[in-house]
Image: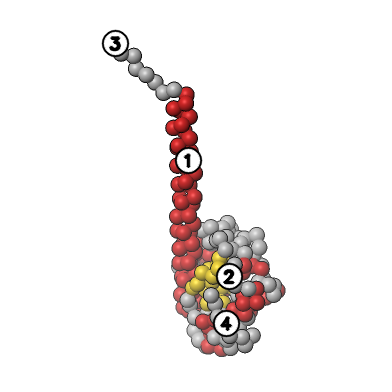
Amino acid sequence: MKNRRGFTMIELVVVLGILMLLMAILLPAVQCVREAARRTQCLNNHKQLGVAYFLATDSSQPIPRDWAVDLLPFLDQKALCDLPVAEAASSSVAIFNCPSDTPWKSVTGIVSGNYQQNGFVSLLTLSKIPDGCSSTVLSSEGRSEFIGAWSNSPAAMGFVMSPHSSGNHVLFCDGHVRYLDTDQISPELIEAILRPNDGGIVSLP
């Protein structure tokens, strides 16, 4: 009867080495696909927020200061507005959260999220933005550990800190959303699209 030959140690090491090499090649590709899916979801979040903005206001009404709270009824979250503040403070609305980041609690204590409104446009009306709606930021995302008040930051620190690699989703006042590569735009240009009345001509890359 012929003896059955098993794997030698060298053959086993070679097989394991090939498997590890394949994993090393495939893992970054899988991570890239997942990040692309998260970026797409983040983009859709901004688009839905833009629709809610235009449902909550019109060309003659000012942009709300407490934007997250005022938009809730237009995001199928009216029930959250009716909850006691202490109970609502522990709630997290998915549309306010970037899938690539961890939720951050807003200063209003009502919702948690990673997106923030441009403080420079609060209480302005869309029809009276001097620099034009298409070149003025309405809201954007920011990393949870760096998010803060834009109006107090000339360098727009909260704007440039995004959980996505070298970029940031931005909702403009006319409702369109763009992914801006923050490695290709200067702090001065970021400042220009944040301020609604600086008088400059904006040309984004």
Distance from Cα at disc 4 to Cα at disc 2? 14 Å
Amino acid type, label 4: Val
Q: Position of residue 72 (x, y in %)?
A: 51, 70
Residue ID at (49%, 84%): 58
The residue wearing badge 3 is: 1
The residue wearing badge 2 is: 184
State whether residue 167 appears in this view: yes
- Residue 202: mark in rendering: 4
Distance from Cα at disc 3 to Cα at disc 2? 72 Å
Instruction: Give left or right: position of 146 versus 171.
Output: right
**Is 80 above or below relative to 53?**
above
Other residues around mark 1 within 10 Å, as few (<14) / some (14–19) / many (≥20): few
Distance from Cα at disc 3 to Cα at disc 4? 84 Å
State whether residue 52 appears in this view: no
Q: Nearer the viewer, mark 4 or mark 1?
A: 1
Helix, strand or loop at disc 2?
A: loop
Distance from Cα at disc 1 to Cα at disc 3? 39 Å
Contact, mark 3 vs mark 2 (Cβ under 8 Å): no
For residue 141, which quarter of the picture? Answer: bottom right
Q: Nearer the viewer, mark 4 or mark 2?
A: 2
Other residues around mark 4 within 10 Å, as few (<14) / some (14–19) / many (≥20): some
Amino acid type, label 1: Leu
- Residue 21: mark in rendering: 1
Contact, mark 2 vs mark 1 (Cβ under 8 Å): no
In front: 16, or 103?
16
How many marks overall?
4
Helix, strand or loop at disc 1?
A: helix
Amino acid type, label 2: Gln
Q: Position of residue 26 (x, y in %)?
A: 45, 47
